[in-house]
Every structure is written in C-alpha cells, then in structure tokens.
Amino acid sequence: MTNLDATFSALADPTRRAILARLCRGEATVMELAEPFAMTQPAVSRHLKVLEGAGLIERRVEGTRRPCRLASTGLTEIDEWLGMLRKALAANYDRLDLLLAAMEATDPAAANPVSPPPKADEPT
Amino acid sequence: MTNLDATFSALADPTRRAILARLCRGEATVMELAEPFAMTQPAVSRHLKVLEGAGLIERRVEGTRRPCRLASTGLTEIDEWLGMLRKALAANYDRLDLLLAAMEATDPAAANPVSPPPKADEPT
C-alpha cells in the first residue's frame, strides 16, 4: 500500500474521522478516546494504529501515558495530490468563463438570455 | 455509506486515482480510458461507477458517446472536512511559535541554543 492508499483509506472510516475530530480539540490517550466512543481500548488501539500508519496522528511517551495528537505528514501528502484535481477543476471553470465572455462579445443575448425588463422612463 | 466515506474510499484505490489524473487532462470515454490502463471496459466501468457515486466525476451524453469529466462535488465535501484538520494543525504550530517566543523573552539562549560565534572585533 502506498501512503496515499493508506491515508485515503484511513479517512474512509467514520469512527477514525470522529477520533481525528476529537484530536482537533487537543491530544488524548487511548483511555480518553475509548470513553466517548463507547469502544473497547483494543478497538480504539487498532484504529489509532491505522491512523498512525497513515501519518495522520503521532504518539509521544509521557511517563506511562502515550497521548496521541494530530500529525501533518498524511494531510500534506493527500493535499498535494488533491491539488492536481483542484487545479484541473479551476482550469475547467476558467475555460467556461472564457467561453461565456466570447459568447457575450458576439451576442449579448446568448450569454444573458433573461434580460431585465426595460425601465418605465426609457424609450423601448 | 455517507458521502465522505464514499469519496475517501474511492480515492484510496490507485487505479481510480490514475483515472482521475487522466481526466485532469480532459474528458474521456470508457474506451479511451480502458486502453492506457490495459483494463477491460467492464472493469473501467465499475471504477467509473464508484467515482461517479463519490461525486468525483460526472458523465454527459453526446450522441452515442458518454464522456466522463471531473466533478467538483466530492472534492468540495472532503476539502471542507479536511479544513478542520488543517486549522487544528495550524493552531498547534501557532501555539508552538508562542511557546518559543515566550522562551526567548525569558531566556534567549534556551530558544536559540546554538549562538553564533562572537565577532573578532567585539569584546567577548
């Protein structure tokens, strides 16, 4: 599995997205994460392992605690890839704008088929 | 499956990402997509169905052709969700900056442990 496969796949699960949403508010331990999600600690640990492998979270050692927090690696990688889609879609809209502008230049009515009604004090 | 599940899951497959990368260069039919990927048309059709369900592509009818092109719905939805992660990660970096600034204010050596060597013409 490439990193992109792992990261997109990790994000495809609603529980894992909920864990990430919780970590947006600050770091948390497995125990702190298990409670609100009504999940066992081993189940949470499995999800955390997937998120860690995807570069979406990291864990640090603090005495006997191992709190998790958001990591930027995974997000940076998928954002780079998604950038290609964003650029292509923006280019499509730019082409549409150019097309509409060209239509308006040759035939104003074609680009704006619903013309406002003429004002009362203007000769029609 | 929510839309976020469907979109992230659609993006987790390398063949589907390759199809999207091809569509970034312009619209294409199933036949045009099957050739470079050395896949059968039914296999390509299955991938396109997943991408269409995820709001990542759309198809239009043009006589007997049904060319595919990129759609913005899926990307907009996941970008909105990813925005929450981006904001949280940026806030973490801001906190780190504040912490470093506070350290520097009370003890410049702590924030910048490697001091430059004193200049030759300066008294040490």
Image (cartoon, coloured by chain):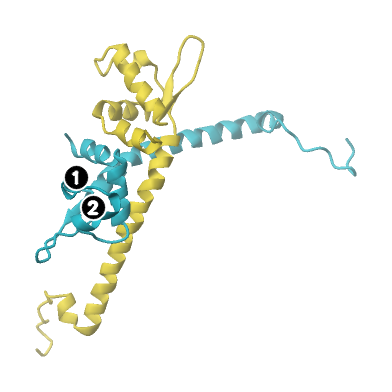
Chain colours: A yellow, B cyan
Q: As drawn, is B78 to the left or to the right of B41?
A: right
Q: Helix, strand or loop at disc 2?
A: helix
Write down the residue under mark 2: B34
Tag 1: amino acid: Ala
| Residue at the spot 31% in from the left edge and 48% down from the top edge | B18
The N terminus of chain A sits in image quarter: top left
Q: As drawn, is B32 to the left or to the right of A69?
A: left
In contact (CB < 8 Å): disc 1 and disc 2: yes
Residue A45 location (% of width, % of height) = 35, 17
The C terminus of chain A sits in image quarter: bottom left
Residue B121 location (% of width, % of height) = 90, 44
Q: How many residues crowd around disc 1 within 10 Å: few (fewer than 14), some, or many (20 or more)?
A: few
| Residue at the spot 53% in from the left edge and 32% down from the top edge | B96
Residue B79 location (% of width, % of height) = 31, 44
Tag 2: amino acid: Ala
Q: Helix, strand or loop at disc 1?
A: helix
Question: Which numbered marker is on residue B43?
Answer: 1
* Chain under callout 2: B
Does B67 sit above or below residue A48? below
- Please check whether the numbered discs 1 and 2 fall on a single chain: yes
Does B49 sit above or below residue A103? above
Q: Nearer the viewer, residue A47 or B40?
A: B40
Residue at far top of view: A64
Q: As drawn, is B120 to the left or to the right of B88?
A: right
Res. B60 in view: yes
